[in-house]
Amino acid sequence: MRFRFENNVLDGDLRELTCGGAAVPLQPQVFDLLLYLVAQRTRVVSKDDLISQVWSDRIVSDSALNSRINAARKALGDDGATQRLIKTIPRKGFRFVGEVREELAASIVPAEARPVPSRVGDRPAIAVLAFENMSGDPAQDYFGDGISEDILTALSKQRWFMVIARNSSFTYKGRAVHLRQIAEELGVSYVVEGSVRKANNRVRITAQLNDATSGSHLWAERYDRELVDVFAVQDEITNAIVAAIEPQIHAAESFRAHRKAPASLDAWDLLMRALSHYWRVTRRDHDTARTLLERAIGIDPNYGQALSVLAANYMFGVHLGWAELAAVAPVAEAAALAAVRCDHEDAWAHVALGSVCFSTRRLADALSAFEQALALNPNFSLAQGYYALALSYAGRSKDSFEAAQRAIRLSPRDPSLAIYHGIAGYARFTERRYDEAIALAREAIRHRGDLTGAYRVLAVSAGMTGDEMLAETALSELRRTQPDISLHWIATQLPWANDGDREHYLEGFRRAGLR
């Protein structure tokens, strides 16, 4: 449906607002809010209505809600004083009061003009088989089936690969069928299988991810738990399995891509190669990933996942001091918004947009984007990590530490594990728990010896504790990983919500010896 008012057109199908024919950039959540207000214009919309319809009943502060209302007004050339189109009804809510004409979008814009996600055939496919009941009691089949179905459902939220429906993959239950046959019949590259053994009040669950083409095991794990709460155990193990699978598939697909001749690489291959560089978190790999992603987008301009990773890559470079914010932020934001338009249900797209908002000091918008990513895919460890980082700069240290710990628990073999430890360390630094911050920074460095953020946390924490030798060592390593680090860069480039946190960080660096 399209809505026309004044010189604006709000297109719900294309998810686009135009003014005089020119596109008006809108963050996805602001678009959702505006669309809801326009569609419900015959009544006053309460705060609870907006939280239910736009935020899916998540906890939202008044300031976050008001910032979205203000953003919607600004996009329409309205403001809080004039309230020409969006009117605040005191103690009641909001109402869209403009004159609106409705029209069917399909009659105006041809379908082929709409951006579409890449075809399913560009992605690998995965099948989740029914987990085998090893308990010797057929009545226990439900537990293994429940684990399998939960894994299948959770994997379906990850838009990187196609997941075969239960009705197809469960047909192999109880049959001894070779993985290669399953792969051929279902058209998949990867198969998840496992088993469940229950005895008394304990359960053992095994799971493995198989490359169906070669027959090799890419990942396997065993989980032993007490069945105090069956559903809690089921959820915990499902989350652990799903969080482990995505990076393993990325690694396998990257390996396949690296075996291809450069001239034969398609957009998916380029994306997989780019991801392998993105996860390494070095300046050289940062530049290589950008080049590969730009090539992928050159092949497919509507490739949402490539656009998402490109935006995230740009912003991560800014945070680590490898790129100038003013130079890359507009390009990154355009890529992130395009990714959201391509696939509004892709958690990666919202993480990319959140990372842009974070670096450009729009912390409320960043937190909202990361929360939306986690609502779409609760097992997305990278989204948890980014969320933790934004929370720390927003002054919510306790929440930040907890989010970082969730990221670590979700994916203990994650390529970004060192980063999550570093973020947890920074959260502890902001709480003045310097010894814990030092321990977490050292754990991050143990995983990655060239991680800029971890050396920052180590340097400021050592500075505040008066450990001159450790501070000097940390600062020396930091200068190796970020040669242009300075008090001026720290004061101007990192997006704190309040001056007290910035001054605390600067004081740690001053005591460590940075000038």
Image (spheres, grey):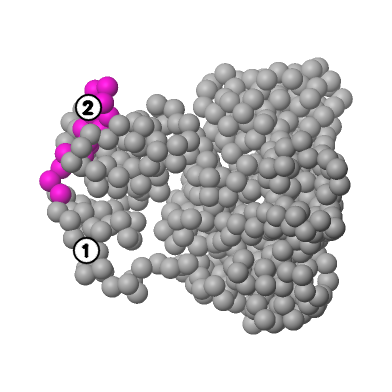
Q: Can residue 247 be seen in this view?
A: no
| Front position in the image: 422 or 347 | 347
Sequence-wise, the earlier of marks 2 and 1 is 2
Q: Is residue 93 part of the magenta span, yes or no? A: yes
Q: Residue at x 50, y 67 (%)?
A: 303
Question: In the image, what residue occupies the spot 72% across and 73% down?
Answer: 172
Q: Where's residue 287, x and y in %?
A: 64, 58
Name above or below for residue 398 compared with residue 182.
above
Query: Residue at coordinates 77% horizontally, 74% vertically from top-left?
Result: 175
Q: What label does residue 89 carry, if any?
A: 2
Place residue 155 in its image quadrant: bottom right
Q: At label 1, which amino acid type do we have?
A: Leu
Residue in the foreground of this view, choosing between 316 and 284: 316
Expressed as whole percent of the image width and height from the top left, the position of residue 420 reads: 71, 40
Residue kind at label 2, given as amino acid type: Ile
Residue 127 locus on image (x, y percent): 67, 68
Tell me if residue 28 is in the magenta stretch.
Answer: no
Q: Residues within 10 Å of mark 2 (few under 14, many from 20)?
A: few
Query: In this rendering, does residue 237 appear at all?
Result: yes
Q: How far apart are marks 2 and 1 (CA)?
A: 30 Å
Q: Give the range drawn in magenta.
A: 85-100
